[in-house]
Amino acid sequence: MSEFHRPAPGTKIASVAQAVDELRSIRDLMRWACSRMNDADVAFGQSAVDARTEAIAVMSWALALPPDEMEDWFDCRLSRSEREVIALLVDRRCSERVPAAYLTGEAWLAGLCFRCDPRALIPRSLIAETMQGALVQWLDEHPRRDPGWPATILDLCTGGGSLAILAALAFPEASVTGCDLSPEALELAATNRDLHGLQTNVRFLQGDCFEPVMREKFDLILCNPPYVNDFSMGNLPAEFRSEPRLALAGGPDGMDLIRRILAGAPSHLNPDGALVLEIGHEAEHFERAFPKLEHHWLGVSAGDRMIALIEARSLRRAAARAA
């Protein structure tokens, strides 16, 4: 009985020129792009979870189509110039190990497009998912005293501003503030705010942690802080090293800035306030660092222990114990 073997590299479409010459439809290029990225062993996780998602991101940008509509066009034939743009982007993605979002200058999160470049993390915070699911459900089950809650929202470590913008759209009556240490990231955040027409209810302030908001208090604080521990930072794939280290590195256990946030949050939350904190895969370190802190997990598609919600009263009790 004959055996089937994977074709040797020389027998596959190995070059951009060959791909442009031989492939015609979006489906053909999709298949080639996925094979090319998988063969190159590129790393995913920066808004794209696998080769297919990343290929769709590249193609949707090149063809000016929303990513969620791409499948409707899979069998369409492309012009040579369109094939060239897509093939060159895929080739750069593999050879330079640059995230696709930085190559195209845009990323999609929760159905919205955001401008994207190395001044800030690629938009991908799981908190965005909670604003359409677990956070909304939690708020329904734990109604605030004020029916207009939240009237004020702070997005700490806002980066390119995606969470601040999504919060302003999810809670259109709220006033939203985004803070970040990086002035460069805030320039990008302002671009995104203007792109979505939210100049009147979203502002951005520059400074360290809570410093820019001084004595202001908020109903809701959202935060996707740097939380990657030192060991994981040392093993980051090249794609992740393209992002600002300041926005990723969280110290030996990933909790360096989180300690400061939890210490400062009680002074910046209204009595019925809450902090929604992303900690990614650092739940073990989080619970070891704050063993007595009362918190709730907001489940997301990536896992059940990646987003913590901490009520203001719990933070005040923790601060009183530490005093």
Image (spheres, grey):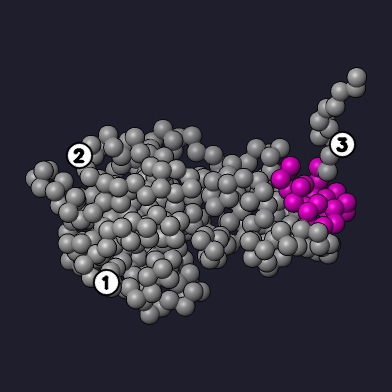
Does the residue at mark 2 contact the one at mark 3 (Cβ under 8 Å)?
A: no
The secondary structure that most of the magenta stretch takes on is: helix
x and y, in percent, of residue 158 in the image: 38, 60
- For label 1, the SS is loop
Outermost residue to the top: 1
Q: Nearer the viewer, residue 170 or 125?
A: 170
Quadrant of the image occupied by residue 293: top left
Please tell me whether mark 2 or mark 3 is closer to you in this view.
2
**Which residues are drawn in magenta?**
14-36
Residue 167 in view (yes/no): yes
- Residue occupied by mark 3: 11
Residue drawn where x is 51% and y is 45% of the image: 240
Q: Is residue 268 in the magenta section?
A: no
First in sequence, mark 2 or 1: give its number: 1
Quadrant of the image occupied by residue 175: bottom left
Report crowding for label 1: few under 14, some 14 to 19, many 20 or more residues within 10 A (C-alpha).
few
First in sequence, mark 2 or 3: give its number: 3
Relative horizontal placement of residue 139, taking residue 89 as reference (left or right) = left
Residue drawn where x is 84% and y is 32% of the image: 7
Q: CA distance from mark 1 to mark 3?
A: 65 Å
Inspect the image, locate mark 1, and give the three-letter code of the amino acid beneath it: Pro
Outermost residue to the bottom: 200
- Residue occupied by mark 1: 147
The C terminus sits in image quarter: top left
- For label 2, the SS is loop
Inspect the image, locate mark 2, and give the three-letter code of the amino acid beneath it: Lys
x and y, in percent, of residue 148 in the image: 28, 73
